[in-house]
Amino acid sequence: MRKISLLMVGAVVGAGLTAVTLRTNLMSATSAVAANAETYRSLNLFGDIFEKIRTDYVEKPDERKLIEAAINGMLTSLDPHSGYLDPKSFRDMDIDMRGRFGGLGIEVTMEEGTLKVVTPIDDTPAFRAGIMTNDLIREIDGDAVQGLTLTQAVEKMRGPVNSSVKLKIERPGRKELIEFTLVRSDIVVPAVRARMEGDDVGYIRISTFSEQTFDGLRRGIERAVADAPGDKLKGFIIDLRNNRGGRLDQAVLVSDAFLERGEIVSTRGRNSDETQRFSAKSGDLTRGKPVVVLINGGSASAAEIVAGAIQDHKRGQVMGTRSFGKGSVQTIIPLGANGALRLTTARYYTPSGKSIQAKGIDPDIVVLQDIPDELKGKDETKGEAGLKGHLSGGAKPEEEKSGSSSYIPTDKAKDNQLNAALDLLRGIKRDAANQATPAAPATRQN
């Protein structure tokens, strides 16, 4: 009897649960239908407004441009890194990833409608003319930059090789605009530059994460190992300062070059089944030599993935100032002949599970540069947290951090961060108040 009673009670309870489940599902379905109805009403509103503009605006509008602007407005309302790429912009982005184009050699960003120089590329027309980080470009060929998108401004500066372009630039600390006349050249952006510092330290500067980056890094490491006599090589400096990022796959390969095992980075989207984890394969290209990674307020995205992996695995010391804080992943979704979407689809996390979105990576060793008087207070990059509409990192707003200095002296002798890294690898202690040198250089991961 007890068994029968339990079955009957179970049946009654099951029936009750089934009724509750059906009622819950019905309510969810009703709610979804209501939400869909509201969405379609909003789309009808969009159609009505588009039709009014098309028929009643004072001049006949370009309907395609209207639709593209609406699409781009929808995407940019999500976060600063999502957007619509028209066919030309999509082609230009592909050129950027390859690292070759006709232009001036300036890396720029748009901050609140102002075109700001992130860094001039070495040995280009802009670099030779003396254009500097944090310069503000006010005019291009006599046309005001205000009101242009970043894509439009870049398009105006690019052009046929040997053609000229005039820029008017506002420089912090100068009252008058500075005028430059530059001749465009074939800009080949070397993703990696390598040299020896003395005969005992390999210096590798990674300026961007394009499809050339890992191959350039590998060649730089091989050259340093070959050039250092005997076992004199004390280690490597990996300079990621003012590196705005690029391809995720290249960031993974660069990190893997220094690691024997372990997670490099994970990306997590809206759904748990979209999580991806990238791990190191056996084989440290430097054979365990000490590594110092330099970062600053201009180090973002893929550069932060590398710095985070090296830091979390204690494979080397991260030195400089706090990084930019772009901890999101953008997926490029081609739209055939209509260009592409650049859509933020995930956040990325360092091996320890830390999101750096809107916070950045704090260096193990803080080293400040000596800022020229005319640039003091104007040398900082605001960072991700300073971008309007930025994506939350999942932390409380008060835990978000603004950017830090992105100034790098052109004179190597005055580069405090580079010289501190050299001293660290060579075992020389520094007395500067803003530096705290560990007792011994970083060693290979065990």
Image (spheres, rainbow, N blue to C red):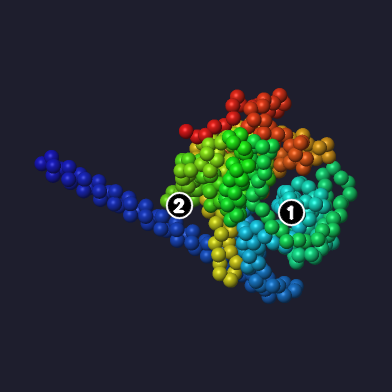
| Residue depicted at x 86% and y 55% | 179
- For the view shown, which residue lies furthest in the front direction? 230
Q: Mark 1: which amino acid?
A: Ile
* Residue 49 locus on image (x, y percent): 64, 68
| Residue depicted at x 62% and y 58% | 97
Q: Mark 2: which amino acid?
A: Glu
Looking at this view, is 49 or 16 the one in front?
49
Q: Is residue 46 visible?
A: no
Q: Which of the image's four quarters has the N terminus? A: top left
| Residue depicted at x 61% and y 26% | 438
* Residue 350 locus on image (x, y percent): 52, 41
Report helix, strand or loop for mark 1.
strand
Looking at this view, is 22 or 414 the one in front?
414
- For the view shown, which residue lies furthest in the left direction? 1
- Residue 182 horizontal side relative to residue 194, left or right: right
Quadrant location of residue 311?
top right
For disc 2, the neighbor class at 10 Å (few under 14, some 14 to 19, many from 20) is: few
Residue 216 against residue 400 in the figure, above or below: below
Location of mark 1 (residue): 106
Location of mark 2 (residue): 274
- For the view shown, which residue lies furthest in the right direction? 176
* Residue 122 locus on image (x, y percent): 73, 50
Report helix, strand or loop for mark 2.
helix
* Residue 88 locus on image (x, y percent): 65, 67
| Residue depicted at x 72% and y 49% | 118
